[in-house]
């Protein structure tokens, strides 16, 4: 048997197509320090067990999940504005988590916890059904080349997964600066019977006050002359 065949024979199932590539490059000393110091209190280690929110946050409050928060500037600002809510951020980019932790430390934010893991797996295994008041997905990787579109997060299966984690009346809030991805989001969400479009059928939403700051990726879109499309869908 060739080593290649052996390798193939040892793979138990095909790897799922991922929406991200690991790019944990350089971290600053400050990011490294804060990750080590704060992970025990803010970090959530991925396991295949459902989260116990009361144990994690020490209270019962509406919970918002942010997928792919980047460097977390927006998540930090939203969590600071809403101390009455609890936030779970998921990111696969470690330096970004470091930057968020620095903000949490300097601004003494209490209501954020973080996974360093693939959001799809976190949703599947860790988030209890109908337990979220909101899911935020701001400027997800657009994967602009057609052959990479399969890597885009917003696909029917993913949208169904999100729907199952939102409570009735919960909001799935999305934003992108890529027109064809915005149209894909509109199409997939409109086709999902578990959601209704708060802006009206086929309509994009106004810029929401729930996004108090312009993120790095939003700025990049603006600088390149791209429009911003926002969607808010309510769980039926
Ligand atoms: C284009 S950036 C946008 C970051 C941020 N939301 C903003 O607006 O500045 C997309 C982010 O999503 C993260 N990401 C992509 N797929 C992910 C996944 N499956 N789970 C967790 N994070 C993911 C990437 O690491 C990246 O930081």
Image: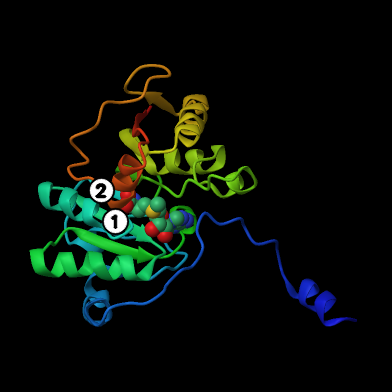
Q: Residue beneath label 2, please? A: 63
Residue 23's place in the image compared with 118, above or below, is below
Q: Residues within 10 Å of mark 2 (few under 14, many from 20)?
A: many
* Residue extending furthest toward the front: 224
Quadrant holding the C terminus: top left
Tell me, what colour scheme is on the image?
rainbow
Q: Position of residue 180 (x, y in %)?
A: 50, 33
Answer with left or right where residue 190 lies relative to residue 145. left
**Which quadrant of the structure image shows residue 111?**
bottom left
Asked if ligand 1 lies within 8 A of label 2, the reply is no
The residue at the point 23 percent across, 58 percent down is 54
Residue 76's place in the image compared with 136, above or below, is below
Q: Position of residue 202 (x, y in %)?
A: 43, 19
Q: Quadrant of ligand 1?
A: bottom left
Q: Residue beneath label 1, please? A: 88
Q: Residues within 10 Å of mark 1 (few under 14, many from 20)?
A: many
The answer to whether any part of residue 67 appears in the image is no
The residue at the point 41 percent across, 74 percent down is 25
- In contact (CB < 8 Å): disc 2 and disc 1: yes
Q: Position of residue 137 (x, y in %)?
A: 36, 45
Q: Nearer the viewer, residue 120 or 209?
A: 209
Q: Which mark sits nearer the N-terminus, 2 or 1?
A: 2
Q: Nearer the viewer, residue 225 or 12?
A: 225
Foreground disc of the pair 2, 1: 1
* Secondary structure category for the residue under label 2: strand
């Amino acid at each position: 048997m060739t080593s290649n065949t052996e390798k193939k024979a040892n793979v138990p199932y095909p790897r799922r197509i991922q929406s991200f590539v690991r790019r944990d490059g350089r971290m600053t000393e400050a990011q490294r320090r804060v990750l080590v110091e704060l992970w025990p209190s803010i970090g959530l280690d991925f396991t295949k067990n459902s989260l116990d929110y009361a144990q994690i946050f020490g209270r019962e409050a509406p919970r918002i999940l942010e997928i792919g928060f980047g460097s977390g500037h927006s998540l930090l600002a939203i969590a600071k504005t809403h101390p009455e809510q609890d936030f779970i951020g998921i990111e696969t980019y470690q330096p970004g988590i470091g930057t968020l932790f620095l903000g949490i430390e300097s601004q003494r934010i209490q209501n954020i916890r973080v996974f360093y893991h693939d959001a799809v797996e976190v949703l599947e295994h860790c988030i209890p059904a109908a337990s979220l008041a909101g899911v935020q997905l701001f400027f997800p990787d657009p994967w602009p080349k057609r052959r990479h579109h399969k890597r885009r997060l917003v696909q029917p299966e993913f949208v169904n997964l999100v729907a199952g984690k939102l409570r009735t009346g919960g909001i799935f809030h999305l934003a992108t600066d890529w027109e064809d991805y915005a149209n894909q989001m509109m199409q997939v969400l409109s086709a999902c019977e578990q959601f209704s479009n708060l802006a009206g059928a086929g309509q994009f939403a106004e810029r929401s006050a729930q996004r108090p700051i312009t993120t790095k990726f939003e700025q990049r879109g603006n600088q390149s002359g791209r429009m911003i499309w926002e969607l808010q869908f309510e769980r039926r």
